[in-house]
Image (cartoon, rainbow, N blue to C red):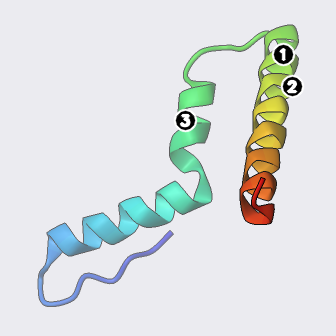
Amino acid sequence: MQVVVRDNNVDQALKVLKKKMQREGIFRELKLRKNFEKPSEKRAREKAEAVSRARKMERKRLEREGF
């Protein structure tokens, strides 16, 4: 991943790099890989995330339809 530093503005380049890494999901990946996760725990976490996403989508759909 590359970021162009313009006019020696390192702070701006770091901000852009952090945003790119966030979009790519690198921080989330690092957090998940920090400790070993048992396969059963991984399945449970993924299932819970799927349920959460489904609920969120349903809330947004109902909000759009005006219920």
Q: Amino acid at mark 2?
A: Lys
Q: CA distance from mark 2 to mark 1?
A: 5 Å
State the image coordinates of residue 24 (x, y, percent, origin top left).
60, 59
Asked if the residue at tag 1 contacts the one at tag 2, i.e. Cβ–Cβ closer than 8 Å, the answer is yes
Q: Amino acid at mark 1?
A: Ala
Q: CA distance from mark 2 to mark 3?
A: 20 Å
The image's mark for residue 44 is: 1
Question: Does dot 1 land on a helix, a strand or a loop?
Answer: helix
Q: Residue at x 33, y 83 (%)?
A: 4
Q: Residues within 10 Å of mark 1 (few under 14, many from 20)?
A: few
66 left or right, relative to 15: right
As drawn, the residue found furthest toward the left would be: 8
How many numbered discs, if any?
3
State the image coordinates of residue 56 (x, y, percent, origin top left).
73, 43
Asked if the residue at tag 1 contacts the one at tag 3, i.e. Cβ–Cβ closer than 8 Å, the answer is no
Of marks 2 and 3, the one in the foreground? 2
Q: Amino acid at mark 3?
A: Leu
Q: Residues within 10 Å of mark 2 (few under 14, many from 20)?
A: few
42 left or right, relative to 14: right
Question: Does dot 2 land on a helix, a strand or a loop?
Answer: helix
State the image coordinates of residue 48 (x, y, percent, origin top left).
79, 23
Question: Does dot 3 land on a helix, a strand or a loop?
Answer: helix
State the image coordinates of residue 1 (x, y, percent, origin top left).
51, 69
Image quarter of residue 42: top right
Q: Which residue is mark 3?
A: 30
Image quarter of residue 54: top right
Seen from the viewer's position, the closer of residues 54 and 33 is: 54
Seen from the viewer's position, the closer of residues 36 and 19 is: 19
Q: Which residue is mark 2?
A: 47
Q: Residue at x 12, y 82 (%)?
A: 8
Q: CA distance from mark 3 to mark 1?
A: 19 Å
Q: Residue at x 48, y 66 (%)?
A: 20
